[in-house]
Image (cartoon, helix red, strand yellow):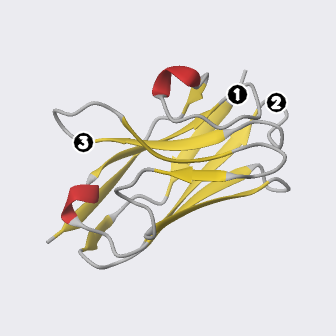
């Protein structure tokens, strides 16, 4: 079993920055692909970013490319999402997710474990 705990969500002004963290426990973290997803009220959960295990290749949704950066610290069993130039449309609950395998993925159904989410609100 894997436990994921997100933190770092907050209210921020448009143009500002935030860093989300996701602490993982329960299994071999370094070999697991990790992802960030978000869900705004009335909308489906959508892919934000992912990082593979081992080689740490990354992937981003077009809407966040160039503004968000996903990274991981395997020594701390933590994955991060650095968010810059935030926009009102980035407002959502952000979820961390983990896969059993090392290959990153961009759809929620491909992830096996989920955190409880952290709220990010961007005021315009």
Q: Position of residue 124 (x, y in %)?
A: 14, 72
Q: State the separation of the CA atoms marked 1 and 2.
A: 6 Å
Q: Quadrant of the N terminus?
A: top right
Q: Position of residue 18 (x, y in %)?
A: 44, 69
Mark 1 lies on residue: 2
1 and 2 marks in contact (CB < 8 Å): yes
Asked which secondary structure carries label 3, the reply is: loop
Q: Position of residue 117 (x, y in %)?
A: 43, 41
Mark 3 lies on residue: 40
Q: Residues within 10 Å of mark 1 (few under 14, many from 20)?
A: some
Q: State the separation of the CA atoms marked 3 and 2.
A: 30 Å
Residue found 57% across the figure and 50% down from its top: 59
Residue found 75% across the figure and 27% down from its top: 101
Asked which secondary structure carries label 2, the reply is: loop
Report which quarter residue 12 is drawn in: bottom left
Mark 2 lies on residue: 27
The numbered mark, 3 or 2, whose residue comes first in the sequence reads 2
Q: Residues within 10 Å of mark 2 (few under 14, many from 20)?
A: few
Report which quarter residue 10 is drawn in: bottom left
């Amino acid at each position: 079993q894997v436990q994921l705990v997100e933190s770092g969500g907050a209210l921020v002004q448009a143009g500002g920055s935030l860093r989300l963290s996701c602490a993982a426990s329960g299994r071999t973290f370094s070999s697991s692909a990790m992802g960030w997803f978000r869900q705004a009220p009335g909308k489906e959960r959508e892919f934000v970013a992912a990082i593979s295990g081992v080689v740490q290749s990354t992937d981003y949704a077009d809407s966040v490319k160039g503004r968000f950066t996903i990274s991981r610290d395997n020594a701390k069993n933590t994955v991060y999402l650095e968010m810059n130039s935030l926009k009102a449309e980035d407002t959502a609950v952000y979820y961390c997710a983990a896969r059993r395998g090392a290959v990153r993925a961009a759809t929620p159904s491909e992830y096996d474990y989920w955190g409880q989410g952290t709220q990010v609100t961007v005021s315009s």
